[in-house]
Image: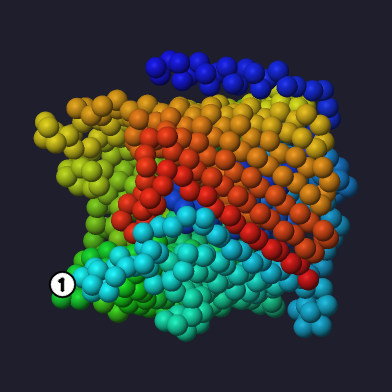
Amino acid sequence: MKSIRILCALAALVFSARLSGSVNPDDLSWESVLEELIPDEELPEAALEQLVEFYEQLHASPLNINTATSDELESLKILSPSQIEAIHAYIYMYGPMKTLGELQLTGGLDWRTRQILRHLVYAGDAIQEKERLSLREMFRYGRSELTLRMDMPLYMRDGFREHTAEELARYPNRSYLGGRLSHKIRYSFNWKGRIRAGFTADKDAGEPFGGRNRAGYDFWSPYLYISDAGPFKTLVAGNYKAVFGQGLVSGSGFSLGKSMSLTGIPSGQTGLKPHSSVSEYGYFRGAGLTFRAGKALSITIMGAYTPADAIVKGDSVVSSFKTDGYHRTELEWSRKHNFITASGAANINYRSNGVSVGATVLSERYSLPTVNGIGYTDVSADWSVRRPAFGISGEIALSGGGGAVLTNNMFRIGRKLSSNVLFRYYSPEFNAPRSGAICESDVRNEAGVLIGLTYSGGRLKSDGYVDMFRHPGSGSGAAGPSNGLEIRVNAAWKASRSDNLDATLRFKSKQKECKPTGTFEYCITWRGRLRWDHTFNRTLSCRTQLFWSRYDFLFEPLSDGTGLSLSSDWNPSPSLSASLQTVFFLTDSYDSSISVYEKGPRYSFGFVTLSGRGGRVVLNLRYKPSARLQFNVKAGSLLYADRDEISSSQQRISSWHKEDINVQLTWKF
């Protein structure tokens, strides 16, 4: 039976391959580029959302390739030290780039990287003087953007149905406090990337709008960001994020995954940045500033008073934090902002000629005691050395009775080949709730070595890593020391001007407790994806994807999963585009589920996890009547062939299918 599944999927792939044409395709669209920039389907949802926000902001305010510093190019998180050096060497030898087509002449950039850069940089004047901050200039040339989004479910969950008074008196959490609609507002003001201000407001399905929420929306995220204001490098106020060093002490609480480390830049963006996403966890609420104490020295001081949701047990002791941001029932509402964190931090950093050293101290005090105490103080020192042939970065941190160290060393083996060796050790006693460092499960109780290779040569780009890790103490799924191994390989090949092939294979073997034997046994998971993109002409393209997964653990049934995704994009004019995606999935259990990348309105790109037997159809429409106005509509349907109801508890839907419609309006003025 499983062989028939695979043969049918391969037949569909071969059949769609017959639909080919000889054309001169356009460059990759921004939606396609954004998918390329998302590194891993296993990223936490909040980290994925922040990454999308980061690249959307870069796309709105691209860098001038002719004046961009090494630090600015490094912040893009897609360039290695040797590629940055190749860009700067070309500009030094031949002068400023007139067009981005000259990226091909640098000799160090593959086709895919060049396509991504076209959406994040531009070829501007070689000499640009920084303009003085002026209210007149700011209001004259600043640009505002307003985005309104509404999600409309065409189904009824149990939490929204009518309940009797007797039922609610006995089970008060069976009913949601608000309506079924979910809606969001985003407003942003941007003046040349130097002044950014705005807010994000979010109301999830089931949350009350108004009434208990006196401010209307359940979550508000206002922010103000100013850069290059006299002696001040950065000023932030409202909700903001802070990333220093490699993220061991302060990394916004989210790791961007292991595959990001293959660029040699594990921490991503550094410094103070506004928090403009709808994520209700991992940010600071307060103010901070970074000022220049010299040409190469900068000092950051910040403070915050941030509310959070906590689960309180016993004598007012917090057992854990609630990070999903939902406040739909009486119980969830009782936990809303019942915990306050007072934060203070300072960072000093020296950067010169590709060498950076810094130190960070972060101290937080809690309004309620937790299982780890009433607060903590973390200190760290970080360093990095960037040269064309190698890059070395790392951080060492102390917290209470525990320590942590993270180093990432990148070496250029040849013109097209580079390697990474990443070492990490996080002691069981290390406590860094704000950490965003690379890890397998948590930034504590873990040691590991990751060895990666990246090949970039013209039409072919391939990378992969082997990660050997160990948990010296007890952790999730193991009541004692445990080991694990993860291997991931990815290859992307531009077969022709119309065809791109991409393949990914992941293997993970990790010990967990086996109840029948009472011992630790290795749980093995496989995940594979084969993708083919074909462009028929300037208006029509298609994508075919095959998915395979396997879950294998002692005394448990072998669980397999397969999937087939067929999608097409139609762009008849600059003002109109449409995409249609159909997915068929067949998995034995949730352990062998498949993850499929799914397009959507702005800020809502991501992966959807599918398990069981069924299909999903998604239609996206974009209409842009003018340069300032854009409408997005997404309609999706999920159908199951192996069940009569979906989900459980208050989220239960008494049907074998569910449909949603998302509508978004973006106005630039």
| Colouring scheme, one of rainbow, by chain, secondary structure, one colour | rainbow
Please identify the quarter of the rendering in which residue 568 is found: top right
Residue at left offset 51%, top offset 57%: 153
Res. 630 in view: yes
Q: Percent from the top left, x then y, of residue 313? A: 19, 70
* Label 1 crowd (10 A; few <14 / some 14-19 / many >=20): few
Q: Is residue 352 left or right of residue 108?
A: left
Q: Which residue lies at the image location 78% right of the left edge and 29% below the top edge?
A: 536
Badge 1 marks a residue whose secondary structure is loop
User: In the rendered image, is residue 362 in sight?
Assistant: no
- Of residues 651 and 466, the one drawn nearer to the viewer in this rendering: 651
Which quadrant of the figure contains the N terminus?
Answer: top left
Please tell me whether residue 578 is drawn above or below residue 507 in the rendered image: below
Q: Is residue 351 above or below residue 179?
A: above
In the picture, measured across the screen, residue 138 lies left or right of residue 58, that is right
Residue drawn at 33 percent across, 28 percent down: 559
Q: Amino acid at mark 1?
A: Gly
Which residue is identified by label 1?
A: 314
Q: Looking at the image, which residue is at 40% across and 57% down?
A: 157
Which quadrant is the C terminus positioned in?
bottom right
On screen, residue 275 versus residue 498, left or right, reads left
Front residue of this view, candidates 139 and 325: 325
Residue 575 location (% of width, % of height): 81, 52
In the image, residue 298 above or below residue 70: below
Residue 243 position, x and y percent, is 50, 62
Across and down, in percent, residue 230 comes to 70, 78
Q: Residue furthest right?
A: 98
